[in-house]
Image: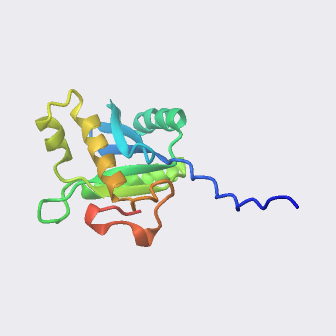
Protein backbone atom coordinates (compact mmCIF):
# COMPACT_ATOMS: atom_id res chain seq x y z
CA UNK A 1 0.00 0.00 0.00
CA UNK A 2 1.45 3.43 -0.91
CA UNK A 3 2.50 5.74 1.85
CA UNK A 4 0.09 8.55 2.56
CA UNK A 5 1.49 11.94 1.79
CA UNK A 6 0.70 14.80 4.14
CA UNK A 7 -1.55 17.41 2.57
CA UNK A 8 0.39 19.98 0.63
CA UNK A 9 0.50 23.36 2.24
CA UNK A 10 -1.05 26.15 0.22
CA UNK A 11 1.40 28.13 -1.87
CA UNK A 12 2.85 31.16 -0.16
CA UNK A 13 1.16 34.37 -1.24
CA UNK A 14 3.20 36.50 -3.58
CA UNK A 15 4.61 39.73 -2.18
CA UNK A 16 2.63 42.87 -2.92
CA UNK A 17 4.31 45.88 -4.44
CA UNK A 18 3.40 49.53 -3.99
CA UNK A 19 4.15 52.96 -5.36
CA UNK A 20 3.75 55.81 -2.91
CA UNK A 21 3.37 59.52 -3.45
CA UNK A 22 4.25 62.62 -1.46
CA UNK A 23 1.82 65.04 -3.12
CA UNK A 24 2.69 68.68 -3.60
CA UNK A 25 1.20 71.42 -5.74
CA UNK A 26 4.34 71.62 -7.91
CA UNK A 27 6.16 68.34 -7.20
CA UNK A 28 5.18 64.78 -6.38
CA UNK A 29 7.75 62.54 -4.71
CA UNK A 30 7.53 58.87 -5.69
CA UNK A 31 8.85 55.75 -3.95
CA UNK A 32 8.48 52.00 -4.42
CA UNK A 33 8.41 49.14 -1.97
CA UNK A 34 7.00 45.72 -1.29
CA UNK A 35 5.79 43.43 1.43
CA UNK A 36 8.63 40.93 1.00
CA UNK A 37 11.28 43.36 2.22
CA UNK A 38 8.83 45.57 4.15
CA UNK A 39 10.77 48.63 3.10
CA UNK A 40 10.57 51.44 0.60
CA UNK A 41 13.07 53.21 -1.63
CA UNK A 42 12.86 56.71 -3.11
CA UNK A 43 12.46 56.69 -6.90
CA UNK A 44 12.14 60.22 -8.22
CA UNK A 45 10.23 63.46 -8.05
CA UNK A 46 7.75 64.25 -10.78
CA UNK A 47 7.85 67.95 -11.60
CA UNK A 48 4.87 68.43 -13.89
CA UNK A 49 1.31 69.70 -13.73
CA UNK A 50 -2.04 68.45 -14.97
CA UNK A 51 -2.03 65.74 -17.61
CA UNK A 52 1.77 65.76 -17.87
CA UNK A 53 1.94 64.82 -14.18
CA UNK A 54 -0.37 61.84 -14.69
CA UNK A 55 1.46 60.79 -17.87
CA UNK A 56 4.73 60.66 -15.91
CA UNK A 57 3.05 58.73 -13.10
CA UNK A 58 1.46 56.41 -15.68
CA UNK A 59 4.91 55.54 -17.02
CA UNK A 60 5.99 54.62 -13.48
CA UNK A 61 2.85 52.54 -12.92
CA UNK A 62 3.49 50.63 -16.17
CA UNK A 63 7.16 50.12 -15.31
CA UNK A 64 6.70 49.01 -11.69
CA UNK A 65 3.24 47.36 -12.01
CA UNK A 66 2.25 47.95 -8.38
CA UNK A 67 -0.59 46.10 -6.69
CA UNK A 68 -1.74 49.30 -4.98
CA UNK A 69 -0.83 52.95 -4.51
CA UNK A 70 -0.24 54.89 -1.29
CA UNK A 71 -0.73 58.65 -0.96
CA UNK A 72 0.46 60.79 1.92
CA UNK A 73 -2.23 63.13 3.22
CA UNK A 74 -1.03 66.07 5.34
CA UNK A 75 -2.59 67.12 8.64
CA UNK A 76 -1.65 69.67 11.28
CA UNK A 77 0.02 68.34 14.46
CA UNK A 78 -3.35 68.39 16.26
CA UNK A 79 -4.92 66.26 13.51
CA UNK A 80 -6.85 69.13 11.93
CA UNK A 81 -6.96 69.24 8.13
CA UNK A 82 -4.09 71.07 6.46
CA UNK A 83 -4.40 73.43 3.46
CA UNK A 84 -3.30 70.55 1.23
CA UNK A 85 -5.41 67.81 2.85
CA UNK A 86 -8.25 68.04 0.33
CA UNK A 87 -5.84 68.46 -2.59
CA UNK A 88 -3.98 65.29 -1.61
CA UNK A 89 -7.25 63.38 -1.24
CA UNK A 90 -8.37 64.61 -4.65
CA UNK A 91 -5.03 63.45 -6.08
CA UNK A 92 -5.63 60.01 -4.47
CA UNK A 93 -9.09 59.80 -6.10
CA UNK A 94 -7.62 60.81 -9.45
CA UNK A 95 -4.98 58.08 -9.18
CA UNK A 96 -7.64 55.49 -8.39
CA UNK A 97 -9.81 56.64 -11.28
CA UNK A 98 -7.00 56.74 -13.83
CA UNK A 99 -5.12 53.58 -12.90
CA UNK A 100 -7.88 51.42 -11.39
CA UNK A 101 -5.69 50.36 -8.48
CA UNK A 102 -6.50 50.42 -4.78
CA UNK A 103 -5.29 53.66 -3.22
CA UNK A 104 -4.48 53.95 0.49
CA UNK A 105 -4.16 57.27 2.29
CA UNK A 106 -1.55 57.65 5.03
CA UNK A 107 -1.19 60.52 7.49
CA UNK A 108 2.09 62.06 6.36
CA UNK A 109 2.78 64.59 9.10
CA UNK A 110 6.46 65.61 9.20
CA UNK A 111 7.68 63.30 6.41
CA UNK A 112 9.22 66.08 4.32
CA UNK A 113 10.74 67.65 7.45
CA UNK A 114 12.16 64.25 8.43
CA UNK A 115 13.56 63.70 4.92
CA UNK A 116 15.22 67.14 4.93
CA UNK A 117 16.64 66.57 8.41
CA UNK A 118 18.16 63.30 7.20
CA UNK A 119 19.91 65.19 4.39
CA UNK A 120 18.01 63.53 1.54
CA UNK A 121 19.19 64.58 -1.91
CA UNK A 122 15.59 64.37 -3.15
CA UNK A 123 13.41 65.27 -0.16
CA UNK A 124 10.11 64.66 -1.98
CA UNK A 125 11.03 61.12 -3.07
CA UNK A 126 12.51 60.43 0.38
CA UNK A 127 9.26 61.64 1.99
CA UNK A 128 7.32 59.26 -0.30
CA UNK A 129 9.55 56.42 0.95
CA UNK A 130 8.82 57.39 4.57
CA UNK A 131 5.09 57.38 3.78
CA UNK A 132 5.34 53.89 2.28
CA UNK A 133 7.49 52.63 5.17
CA UNK A 134 4.77 53.81 7.55
CA UNK A 135 2.09 52.05 5.50
CA UNK A 136 4.07 48.79 5.34
CA UNK A 137 4.59 48.88 9.13
CA UNK A 138 0.81 49.21 9.57
CA UNK A 139 0.10 45.90 7.82
CA UNK A 140 -0.58 42.94 10.13
CA UNK A 141 2.62 40.98 10.85
CA UNK A 142 2.72 37.69 8.99
CA UNK A 143 0.03 38.81 6.58
CA UNK A 144 1.91 41.46 4.65
CA UNK A 145 1.49 39.64 1.35
CA UNK A 146 -2.19 40.28 0.89
CA UNK A 147 -4.18 43.44 0.47
CA UNK A 148 -5.38 44.55 3.94
CA UNK A 149 -9.12 44.44 4.51
CA UNK A 150 -10.75 47.72 5.48
CA UNK A 151 -11.42 46.51 9.05
CA UNK A 152 -7.75 45.55 9.52
CA UNK A 153 -6.19 48.88 8.72
CA UNK A 154 -4.43 50.58 11.59
CA UNK A 155 -6.25 53.86 12.17
CA UNK A 156 -3.31 55.13 14.23
CA UNK A 157 -1.13 54.90 11.12
CA UNK A 158 -3.72 56.94 9.28
CA UNK A 159 -4.31 54.40 6.54
CA UNK A 160 -7.52 54.71 4.60
CA UNK A 161 -8.93 53.77 1.27
Q: What residue lies at 29% left-to-right and 52% top-to-bottom?
A: 134
| Left-right relation of 156 to 57 | left
The number of numbered discs placed on residues in the rendered structure image is 0
Residue 129 against residue 122 in the figure, above or below: below
Q: What residue lies at 36% left-to-right and 55% top-to-bottom?
A: 90
Q: What residue lies at 33% left-to-right and 66% top-to-bottom?
A: 154
Q: Nearer the viewer, residue 146 or 28?
A: 146
Q: Nearer the viewer, residue 72 or 140?
A: 140
Q: Is residue 139 visible?
A: yes
Residue 92 against residue 32 in the figure, above or below: below
Residue 63, position as x, y percentages in the image:
52, 32
| Left-right relation of 13 to 93 | right
Quadrant of image for the N terminus: bottom right
As drawn, the residue found furthest toward the top would be 121
| Left-right relation of 118 to 88 | left
Residue 4, position as x, y percentages in the image:
78, 62
Q: Quadrant of residue 119?
A: top left
Residue 140 against residue 122 in the figure, above or below: below
Q: Nearer the viewer, residue 87 or 103?
A: 103
Residue 118, position as x, y percentages in the image:
14, 35
Residue 3, position as x, y percentages in the image:
80, 59
As drawn, the residue found furthest toward the right would be 1
The structure's colour scheme is rainbow
Q: What residue lies at 47% left-to-right and 67% top-to-bottom?
A: 149
Q: Is residue 24 visible?
A: no
Quadrant of image for the C terminus: bottom left
As drawn, the residue found furthest toward the front would be 1
Amino acid sequence: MPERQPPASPPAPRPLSFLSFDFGARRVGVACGNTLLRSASPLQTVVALGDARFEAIGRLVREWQPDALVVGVPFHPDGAPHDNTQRARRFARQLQGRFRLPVHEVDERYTTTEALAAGAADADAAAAALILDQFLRSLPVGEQDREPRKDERDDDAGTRR
